[in-house]
Image: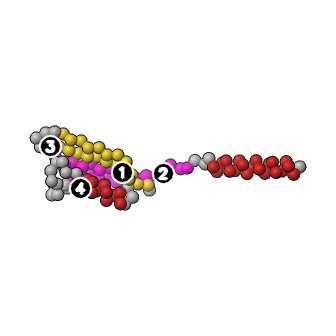
């Protein structure tokens, strides 16, 4: 009789441990930020969307050294990394033309 109670008790404890050990963790909830940097044309500047709620533009014309200059883009990414944002992906597009044309796109994320 005592062996039967010990067996039941051990089985219940094992089931409880198994249920907690394999409990799925909830998916992380993130905010996303996109940056489009254009060095020429009408959209020249940093175009930033934050979390699908906020949008801001930063003019690059006064500080830019040319169509190939992405220093402000890199500085912005570094600044937001300091706020806890992580760079997920980025791409650079260059068009060879007499005026030159370049754009850079990045996605960053931060846990809510």
Task: Identify residue for label 4.
Answer: 72
Q: Position of residue 101 (x, y in %)?
A: 17, 43
Dot 1 or dot 4: first in sequence order is 4
CA gap between label 2 and label 4 equals 30 Å
Q: Position of residue 53 (x, y in %)?
A: 35, 54
Q: Residue at x 24, y 41 (%)?
A: 93
Viewer-side label of 2, 4 = 4
Q: Based on the picture, tell me whether residue 45 belongs to the magenta stretch.
A: yes
Q: Position of residue 78 (x, y in %)?
A: 31, 57
Q: Is residue 98 left or right of 105 when viewed as pictured?
A: left
Q: Residue at x 77, y 50 (%)?
A: 10
Task: Identify residue for label 2.
Answer: 28
| Secondary structure type for disc 4 | helix
Task: Identify residue for label 1.
Answer: 87
Q: Is residue 86 visible?
A: yes
Q: Is residue 70 left or right of 87 when viewed as pictured?
A: left
CA gap between label 1 and label 4 equals 16 Å
The label shown at residue 66 is: none
Q: Position of residue 26 (x, y in %)?
A: 53, 50
| Secondary structure type for disc 1 | strand
Q: Based on the picture, tell me whether residue 37 belongs to the magenta stretch.
A: yes
In the orientation shown, which residue stands out farthest toward the top? 96
Task: Identify residue for label 3.
Answer: 100
Region of the chain picked out in magenta, as a range: 25-52
Dot 3 or dot 4: first in sequence order is 4
CA gap between label 2 and label 1 equals 16 Å
């Amino acid at each position: 009789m005592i062996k039967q109670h010990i067996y039941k008790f051990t089985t219940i404890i094992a089931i409880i441990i198994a249920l907690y050990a394999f409990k799925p963790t909830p998916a992380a909830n993130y905010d996303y930020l996109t940056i489009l940097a254009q060095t020429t044309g009408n959209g020249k500047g940093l175009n930033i969307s934050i979390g699908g709620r906020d949008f801001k533009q930063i003019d690059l014309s006064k500080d830019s050294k040319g169509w190939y200059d992405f220093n402000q883009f890199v500085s912005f990414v570094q600044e937001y990394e300091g706020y806890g944002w992580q760079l997920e992906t980025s791409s650079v597009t260059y068009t060879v033309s007499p005026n030159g044309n370049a754009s850079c796109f990045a996605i960053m994320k931060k846990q809510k």
